[in-house]
Amino acid sequence: CAGSGELRVMVSGGVEPYSIFNPLPSAIRLSSSFIKEAGDYFTVFVRAGACMDEIPLTITDSDANTVTVTITHVDDPDS
């Protein structure tokens, strides 16, 4: 199981604005589920103790084009 952590995802391409779907709100929290402009980003906060190997986040633009970003578990090589 993971400790807490965070990462930033920048959105670009497609047609603004964008929406982000969080399939596991019990494991991660998003700083925003709506991105107004290309080049903006959202932050993914992983909750302490969240146990998962992969979490797919779906980003959809205003023309209904979608892309999936997959967050994967990465072991710290120093641990």
Image: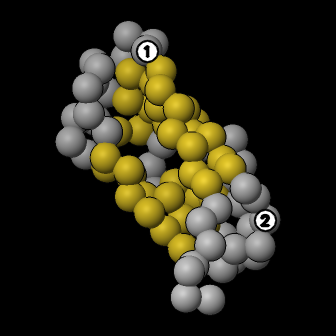
Amino acid type, label 1: Asn
Q: Which residue is labeled 2 in the image?
A: 51
Residue 15's quadrant in the figure? top left
Q: Quadrant of the C terminus?
A: bottom right
Q: Where is residue 35 in the image (x, y as percent from the top left)?
A: 34, 39
Furthest residue toward front: 77
Residue 11's quadrant in the figure? top left
The structure residue drawn at horizontal position 45% and vertical position 13%, both measured from the top left corner, is 64
Disc 1 on helix, strand or loop?
loop
Q: Position of residue 45 (x, y in %)?
A: 54, 65
Q: How crowded is mark 1: few (under 14 residues within 10 Å), some or many (20 or more)?
A: few
Apparent side of residue 7 relative to residue 71 in the rendered image (left or right): left
Q: How far apart are marks 2 and 1 (CA)?
A: 30 Å
Q: Residues within 10 Å of mark 2 (few under 14, many from 20)?
A: few
Q: Earlier in the sequence, mark 2 or mark 1?
A: 2
The structure residue drawn at horizontal position 68% and vertical position 50%, both measured from the top left corner, is 54
Q: Which residue is labeled 1 in the image?
A: 65
Amino acid type, label 2: Cys
Q: Give 52 or 78, whichever is nearer the viewer.
A: 78
The structure residue drawn at horizontal position 29% and vertical position 20%, both measured from the top left corner, is 14
Q: Give 13 or 32, whichever is nearer the viewer.
A: 13
Disc 2 on helix, strand or loop?
loop
Q: Give 8 or 18, whichever is nearer the viewer.
A: 8
Furthest residue toward bottom: 79
Apparent side of residue 33 relative to residue 2 in the rendered image (left or right): left
The structure residue drawn at horizontal position 62% and vertical position 40%, both measured from the top left corner, is 56
Using the image, tell me which numbered label, if any, was put on residue 36.
none
Tell me if residue 13 comes above or below residue 28 in the rendering.
above
